[in-house]
Image: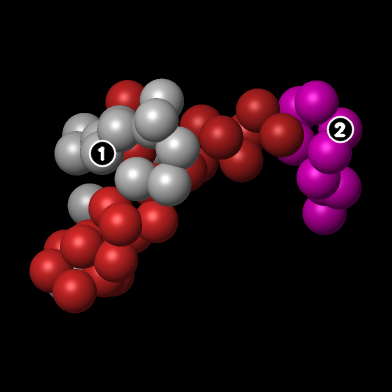
Amino acid sequence: MNRFYKNPHIASALAKESELTSKEMLVYNRKAEEIPREEVFKLFRNAGWIKRR
């Protein structure tokens, strides 16, 4: 998890923002955070969204 989100003040502020609509809820463990950034980069590069060097 990113150190930024471990800050209790940041986490509480983000939770307050998400309470503005009735269908949003606080998420502690996102499945997207389990995907390595290298895999995401490779996917975008192979799709042609990132130029190869």
**For residue 26, above or below residue 53:** above
Q: Position of residue 46 (x, y in %)?
A: 76, 27
Amino acid at the residue labelled 2: Gly
Q: What's the magenta bit mostly, secondary-structure-wise?
A: loop
* Residue in the picture at 19% in, 74% down: 9
Which one is earlier in the sequence, the residue at label 2 or at label 1? 1
Q: Label 2: state its secondary structure.
A: loop
Q: Assign the C terminus to one quadrant of the image.
A: bottom right
Using the rendered view, name the quadrant where residue 30 is placed: top left
Q: How is the image coloured?
A: secondary structure
Q: Label 1: state its secondary structure.
A: loop
Left or right of 40 in this view: 14: left
**For residue 7, above or below residue 5:** below
Left or right of 41 in this view: 15: left
Residue 26, disc: 1
Pick the front one: 4 or 13: 13
* Residue in the picture at 20% in, 62% down: 12
Pick the front one: 29 or 42: 29
* Residue in the picture at 13% in, 69% down: 8
Q: Residues within 10 Å of mark 2 (few under 14, many from 20)?
A: few
The reply to whether residue 17 is visible in this rendering is: yes
Q: Position of residue 43 (x, y in %)?
A: 65, 28
The reply to whether residue 35 is visible in this rendering is: no
Mark 2 vs mark 1, CA separation in Å: 34 Å
Pick the front one: 6 or 27: 27
Instruction: Report the span colored magenta.
Output: 45-53
In magenta stretch: residue 46: yes
Q: Position of residue 25 (x, y in %)?
A: 30, 33
Q: Which residue is mark 2?
A: 48
